[in-house]
Image: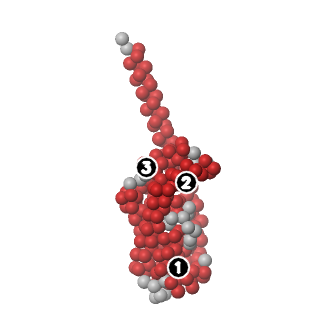
Amino acid sequence: MFAALAPVLGHYGYLAVGVLLFLEDFGVPAPGETVLIAAAVYAGAGQLNLVVVVVVGVLAAIAGDNVGYAIGRYGGRRLLGRYGRYVGLTPPRVQAAEGFFSRHGGKVIVIARFVEGLRQANGIIAGLSGMPWTRFLAFNALGALLWVGLWTTLGDLAGTHIEAIYTALRRYELYLLAALAVLILVLIARRVHRTRAQRHAGRSTDGGSESSP
């Protein structure tokens, strides 16, 4: 993959970094992390400027996620209403997901930046859930800065050993995804338990009121 990107970066430079990251961040398949690492290695060889790579990468990532947000905000619900039932996204499930995202969306946006698949979808989900754009933009920018900073720093420091390091990190990415899934399940379980407890308490109160003289 790094060898395949070499001629693209050599010919288009910062434009290749910006376009590929922009496309990836609203769902178009593109090797975003690999692009950042390769660009950082190029910068270490003196062919690109690392600071410019970081700036271009952050701006492109933010812009791409905002396109995803617009898709979710203005077209996602219509698409789900038409095709959602074919993939198990029934209205009750969508409503539950939107409620969860409304409460924990900021944390999810930052963490999702580091998880393949979630990174491309988090903007669309945020738009679909109706998250305020300014809130989304703030967490999106934070996640983009951390994500771009991590991979460009790694590429700059690792140099010729980057292939082995990148492979190891992608392996552990699966553990991060599993941990995120467990966290989401725990939060949902806590919410369900709290709701049931509140309903039970309300019924007990109503029963006590009716039995009072």
- Against 106, is 167 above or below? below
Other residues around mark 3 within 10 Å, as few (<14) / some (14–19) / many (≥20): some
Q: Nearer the viewer, residue 167 or 194?
A: 194
Q: Which mark is residue 79?
A: 2
Which coloring applies here? secondary structure
Element class at badge 1: helix
Q: How packed is label 1: few (under 14 Cα within 10 Å), some, or many (20 or more)?
A: many
Residue plotted at (58% across, 77% down): 163
Circle 3: residue type: Ser
Q: Are marks 1 and 2 in contact (CB under 8 Å)?
A: no
Identity of the residue drawn at 50% across and 56% down? 75
Read off the residue under disc 3: 102
Q: Observer-nearest residue: 70 or 175?
A: 70
**How far apart are labels 2 and 3 at the CA level?**
20 Å
Q: Earlier in the sequence, mark 1 or mark 2?
A: 1
Depth-wise, is mark 2 or mark 3 nearer the camera?
2
The image position of residue 180, as x and y in percent, is 52, 54
Task: Name the quadrant of the C terminus.
Answer: top left
The kind of residue on which mark 2 rests is Leu
Q: Quadrant of the N terminus?
A: bottom right
Q: Closest to the observer: 159 or 59?
A: 59
Q: Residue drawn 51% across and 55% down?
A: 76
Question: In the image, 133: left or right of 3?
Answer: left
Observer able to see residue 33: no
- Residue, disc 1: 38
Report x, y in % for residue 16: 50, 79
Q: Nearer the viewer, residue 36 or 94?
A: 94
Badge number at residue 192? none
Q: CA distance from mark 3 to mark 1?
A: 36 Å
